[in-house]
Image (tube, rainbow, N blue to C red):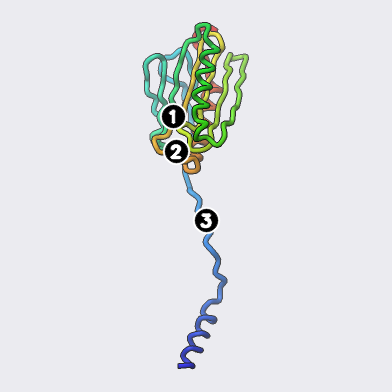
Amino acid sequence: MRNLFFLFLILIFVSCKEDVLPKPKAYLSLNYPTKTYQKLSIERPYTFEILNNTEVINEPNNWLTIKYPSLKASLDITYRPVNNNIKELLTEAEKLVFKHTVKAEQIIPKDFVNPKKRVFGSLYEITGNAASQLQFHVTDSTNNFIKGSLYFYVKPNYDSILPAVDYIKEDILRLVETLEWKSPS
């Protein structure tokens, strides 16, 4: 019996020649299609470039919904004409951003200024489990005002949707960079 125990003990030490290492943490591997853009084909008082693999839904009052079916997300675009009410429109847009402070960890603003195209606005990146992770507004300050909000069709879990947020953020920046007003300003 004693010999059997020693034999078993020797087999354990001899059989393990390699050091056992813990497995590295796995990272989610997401593959997004290569981005190509096209001009908005729906007639509006504005135009900008959108990602080719999105679905654009024509809404009343010059509004749009830009759907990202593979990401289960949409970018809701609202348009309002400016009628000596720019301060009211800006206040309303910022109120909608700061409604997310209950769930947000941080709200990071980024301003846009393009005097040549008369495009002025802000992008708000909302970190944390808020309902909308990106919101923006742009205006020419005299005739046109656009507000956009990104929504996912899932319960917010910021860590899980962050890669998709970053992917769509590039599209929002492209939208603002290519924005042109059609009405006189």
Q: Which residue lies furthest to the front in this view?
A: 102
Dot 2 or dot 3, earlier in sequence: 3
Asked if disc 2 and disc 3 are in contact, CB closer than 8 Å, the reply is: no
The secondary element bearing badge 3 is classed as loop
Dot 2 or dot 1, earlier in sequence: 1
- Label 1 sits on residue: 52
Looking at the image, which residue is at 48% across and 28% down?
37
Looking at the image, which residue is at 54% across and 15% down?
139
Looking at the image, which residue is at 62% across and 14% down?
116
Of badges 3 and 1, the one in the foreground is: 3
Q: Which of 93 and 175 is in front in this view?
A: 93
The secondary element bearing badge 2 is classed as loop
Looking at the image, which residue is at 54% across and 11% down?
86
Residue 61: x %, y % from top left: 39, 14
Q: What residue type is labelled 3?
A: Lys
Mark linked to residue 156: 2
Q: Which amino acid does label 2 sit on?
A: Pro
- Label 3 sits on residue: 25
Asked if disc 2 and disc 1 are in contact, CB closer than 8 Å, the reply is: no
Q: Rounded to the nearest whole Å, what is the CA distance between mark 2 and mark 1?
A: 26 Å
Asked if disc 3 and disc 1 are in contact, CB closer than 8 Å, the reply is: no
Q: Quadrant of the N terminus?
A: bottom left
Residue 62: x %, y % from top left: 41, 15
Q: Rounded to the nearest whole Å, what is the CA distance between mark 3 and mark 1?
A: 34 Å
